[in-house]
Image: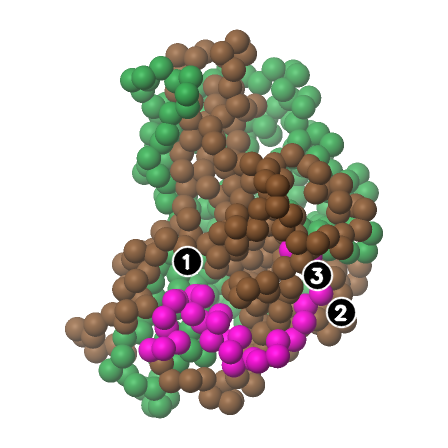
Chain colours: A green, B brown
Amino acid sequence: MTHAVPVAPSVAPPARRIRRLADRQVVDRTELDRLLDGQLIGHLAAVHHGEPVVVPMAYARVGDDLLLHGSTGGGFALRAADERQTVAFAVTALDGVVVARSLFDHSMNYRSAIVYGVLEPVADEPAALDALSDRLLPGRVAELRASTRKEVAATRVLRLPIVDVVMKARAGGPSEAADDGEDHAQWAGVVPHAPSWGEPIASGLTPPGTPLPDSVAALATDSRPA
Amino acid sequence: MTHAVPVAPSVAPPARRIRRLADRQVVDRTELDRLLDGQLIGHLAAVHHGEPVVVPMAYARVGDDLLLHGSTGGGFALRAADERQTVAFAVTALDGVVVARSLFDHSMNYRSAIVYGVLEPVADEPAALDALSDRLLPGRVAELRASTRKEVAATRVLRLPIVDVVMKARAGGPSEAADDGEDHAQWAGVVPHAPSWGEPIASGLTPPGTPLPDSVAALATDSRPA
């Protein structure tokens, strides 16, 4: 699953380049965007007092940036941004379990991207908030009033440029050879794994019979988490 | 969603204790185990050359340990273990999207645990490998021959004790009040989100008509990723 087109120019230190040469690396921007656009949560890692910290965060890809959402004053993402510390943001999709004829050859199909960089403030915070909302629930922004100044002030969006990226993926069935000594009368293959949306549940204040907003109704046929 | 029973004795430095007092914290071991047992992949964060690194890893909870799987010589997990570096391992479940009447009040329902500690070698590597396999595909170990000495030698399992943990969760509908100025004629609520398993796909070498192993057939009714 290695492609010819580089994701982006690398500014990685040597240790990172070593990982770039590793097995299962993907260097196709279309594949990268499909992964980034197919998940809602990533894991942000930073260093605090010399020790690693990691936290799940909602994000949205907009062009060549990842937008990360954090409440004002909340968490180490903001601190890392203020300190201009390099962070690592991981987005992973588990696509299936690979069932083989030996325990050793069992595996998982997955796609994983790690974006390294320095978190930056966004130029237009209301627009970034709208982008994050529409990523969470496509079409929702148009269904509601604009965020108030107070609401915008109470949130902070950070931008991580998609420049230094390592993407890896595994796809397909188990590694198997006809002469590897395993019992080929046994079943082997892949069990696909994907997120799915359930039936919407109305809140207590929603009047009975209120129709679903289009944005919510569309989730039922959403194919983002591919 | 705060409970009374501590997860485990804390050995956290001050910076970590601050996070323990934060909103949405969970301190119930049953809830922690339900999260840890309901996911297949976590994200391991460490520090390398002063910068953060993070990578997705398969894991299994066995009692009060997380077992993490890595190929021999592969990756920074092994290096962090050799250096007795503190690492952070994050497990996150996205349980739903919270739909509100203002963009600002949109949210996600989730459960997230971060386990901090030093990775240790396991005492019984074959048993740990079996535990990891049976976590990935319950019952699979009994269906296959034991791993060979060569196979065991080619893998390495690390153990992260579940001692220093921060768990957070959000559940339920949107924050809403009858007098908050929003239009309560609109729908608000939650759209549940959960992983699901697809139809198993046989590999090329599987003879047509080969029945599914019980372990694979059971995945269709698997409720682990709750």
Disc 3 crowd, CA 10 A, few/some/many (<14, 14-19, 20+): many
Residues drawn in magenta: B115-143
Q: Earlier in the sequence, mark 2 or mark 3?
A: 2
Instruction: Tell me where residue A124 sits by quadrant.
Output: top right
Where is residue A60? Give x, y as percent: 55, 39
Which SS class for mark 2? loop
Where is residue B96? Give x, y as percent: 45, 38
Report the chain holding disc 1.
A
Identify the amino acid type marked 2: Arg
Q: Residue at x 38, y 25 (%)?
A: A202
- Distance from the alpha carbon under mark 3 to that under mark 1: 29 Å
Say above or below: B184 vs A141.
above
Q: Residue at x 79, y 63 (%)?
A: B49
Would residue A81 appear left or right of B194 to someone viewing this image? right
Contact check, label 2 and label 1, Cβ < 8 Å = no
Which SS class for mark 3? strand
Q: Which residue is labeled 3 in the image?
A: B117
Q: Which residue is labeled 1 in the image?
A: A95
Q: Residue at x 42, y 48 (%)?
A: B226
Which SS class for mark 1? strand
**Residue A63 visible to the viewer:** no
Q: Do marks 2 and 3 both belong to one polypeptide chain? A: yes
